[in-house]
Image (cartoon, rainbow, N blue to C red):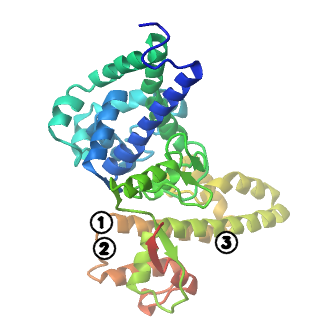
Amino acid sequence: MELFSGLLDLPWWGHAIAALTLTHVTIVAVTVFLHRHQAHRALDLHPAASHFFRAWLWLTTGMVTREWVAVHRKHHAKCDTAEDPHSPQVLGLNRVLWGGVVLYVKEANRPDTIERYGQGTPDDWLERTVYDKLAIFGVFIMLAIDVLLFGVVPGALIWLTQIAWIPFWAAGVINGIGHYWGYRSWPTPDASTNIVPLGILIGGEELHNNHHAYPTSAKLSSKWYEFDLGWLYIRALEALGLARVKHLAPVPRIEAPKPAADLRILQAVILNRYDVLARFARSMKRAYAAELERMCRSSPEDARALKALGPWLDRDEKMLRDSVRKRLDALLPKSPVLSTMVRMRRELAGVWARSAASRRWPSCRGASAATHSQCAIGNFTGLNASDGCVPPSWARTTASYRPRA
């Protein structure tokens, strides 16, 4: 066997295309199988598709499904806190970007993490005897295949690219930059961002803020200008009878105003909470601009302070540093409008935090679910729940929902 040619005698650019193709298959396996299917149950896969992805990931990454799923689920459960396995907000961007794989391995070796968050993953003979017990052997089999197909030098280089691809792009870029830099479509209670609107290179995982807003959605794009390549592959698998989509993000449907908030409206407000918060954030930005203009005329010093704090006004309370929180608390009394809007946003977040504490509708001192929710929304709007009414804007907003197509 020659050093630069194998069974496939390709030019240098052919080897480059082969490397990109093989790494792309791995990206698809991670985003479709590990992430959307196994970790979040957003879709079902036919056993043939599942077995292909499991075998391919064993050959190209050596990752064990249960370990990957457990680490990822813990990331969602403890997102951007000290218990998050890989938060750049806690550990720093460089440590996660360049050492994300080390952080992953460290967390994957914690039995309590695997036991608590790794439930429901494959546990058949193949998983126990081959993919788990012999996890490291798969990548060396892939090395032999690459050398046989492409030659010693090109094959080894292609193999190294395959081995480094997921640790860098998934463990590094998505977990690092995806919680540090980019744009936010949804005001999630963490630092997740969409890195770019076109999710091609990493199979749609670039749309990380969208995913954190609706983690069980099989489709990661949510705006007209966004593209999720992983969703294209899922639709193709669905057309072939190899996949079935279970969950998509809700889309609010605006209805005519109603004088009273019934249970359907209140449930829709909770289900579409990020859409409601996004609309509220846009209103807050308009109020912020007007207040900044007013302060520039009346108190330039306060205006400078407000301008510095502007990006933090619509952030979740737990994402505020103590220094920022203190500066906000000192400045907001000087702007009754912004003070009221920040208070309203915090109360809204409190409503959803209480509703998320249980899968069931919470009760309010023995009251019905509807009464409890009316009480919460009533506190937010300043109206009494006993009046049975909310402002027309609330009656129109997210009056119902339908699956996002």
- Give the secondary structure at mark 2: loop
Name which residue lies at 45% across and 31% down. 22
In the rendered image, residue 90, in percent from the top left (x then y), is placed at 48, 38
Q: Left or right: 170 with respect to 362?
A: right
The residue labelled by disc 3 is: 337
Q: Residues within 10 Å of mark 3 (few under 14, many from 20)?
A: some
Whether 292 is drawn above or below 98: the answer is below
Quarter assignment of residue 357: bottom left
Q: Which mark is residue 358?
A: 1
Label pair 3/1, CB-CB below 8 angstroms: no
The residue labelled by disc 2 is: 362
- Give the secondary structure at mark 1: loop
In the rendered image, residue 205, in percent from the top left (x then y), is placed at 49, 45
- CA gap, disc 1 to disc 2? 7 Å
Quarter assignment of residue 284: bottom right
Quarter assignment of residue 235: bottom left
In the rendered image, residue 403, in percent from the top left (x then y), is placed at 44, 69
Q: Residues within 10 Å of mark 1 (few under 14, many from 20)?
A: few
Closer-to-camera residue (27/237): 237
Q: Residues within 10 Å of mark 2 (few under 14, many from 20)?
A: some
- Give the secondary structure at mark 3: helix
Name which residue lies at 45% across and 50% down. 233
Label pair 3/2, CB-CB below 8 angstroms: no
Q: Residue furthest left?
A: 125
